[in-house]
Image (cartoon, rainbow, N blue to C red):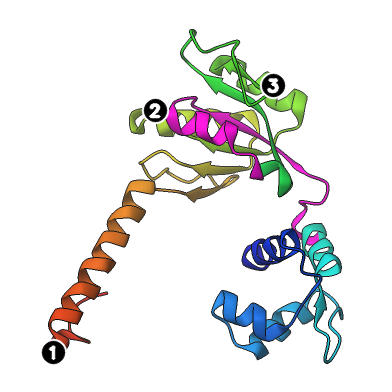
Amino acid sequence: MSLYLRDLEVRLEQGEQTVRSRQLGEALGLTDAQVRKDLAHFGHLGHPGIGYPIPDLLARLRRLAGTDSGWTAALVGVGNIGRALLSYQRFEAEGFRIVAAFDEDHAKVGGIIGGVRIHDLADLPVVVAREGIRLGLLAVPPRAAQGCADAMVAAGIRGILNFAPRRLSPSPSTIVHEVDLSMSLVHLALSVALADAESASPCLHGILPR
């Protein structure tokens, strides 16, 4: 659903009003049949020979994902990555709004970045309860990641997007998605290196690990 949402949002921003299953399939690496099967779960919105009306389909997917009414989120860790996240304007356009940030550095507490006030980490439970926050973004050093994640769970946050370069021990009550930027870059570099090696030595095709 997230892939469909992103593609449809971009198309609507570019002024497109309809899209065919073939176009969606080509963009997302799916077959026409798979796209039609997927979208059939969301209602009968397509028209033969015309395609899917993007505004209607986008509204239906947003409603199912809960992003039509908006999600409030908290950021823990206002370092370089944290500041970049606070300044990222597309979150709100996609139905997510960071309403509070937290840090242990008292020199940062009370400041405002991107219209978001920075609070002391000790105030996390109070602010989360007051704002009805259910999602959290974690952008702290590795040594502090698990402790901060535990504090977020205890405060009532149900989903954590983890930007810290450390895998978290899961909590039964909380969903965690890991975003390891450095590891993604390593994977990218390895993929390029393998592609270069195969190009230089075609006989290695099918032998080198992926």
Q: Which residue is mark 1?
A: 203
Q: Are marks 2 and 3 in contact (CB under 8 Å)?
A: no
Q: Nearer the viewer, residue 59 or 166?
A: 59
Q: Secondary structure at mark 2?
A: helix
The three-letter code of the residue at mark 2 reads Ala
Q: In the rendered structure, which disc, 2 or 3, sits on the residue that comes first in sequence?
A: 3
Q: Quadrant of residue 152?
A: top right
Let me know if residue 153 appears in the view. Answer: no
Residue 145 got which mark? none
Q: Nearer the viewer, residue 175 or 112?
A: 112
Q: CA distance from mark 2 to mark 3?
A: 20 Å
Q: Which residue is mark 3?
A: 127
- Residue 18 placement (x, y as % from top left): 80, 75
Q: Quadrant of the N terminus?
A: bottom right
The three-letter code of the residue at mark 3 reads Val
Residue numbers of the magenta segment: 64-90
Q: CA distance from mark 1 to mark 3?
A: 60 Å
Q: Quadrant of the C terminus?
A: bottom left
The three-letter code of the residue at mark 1 reads Cys
Q: Which residue is mark 2?
A: 144
Q: In the rendered structure, which disc, 1 or 3, sits on the residue that comes first in sequence?
A: 3
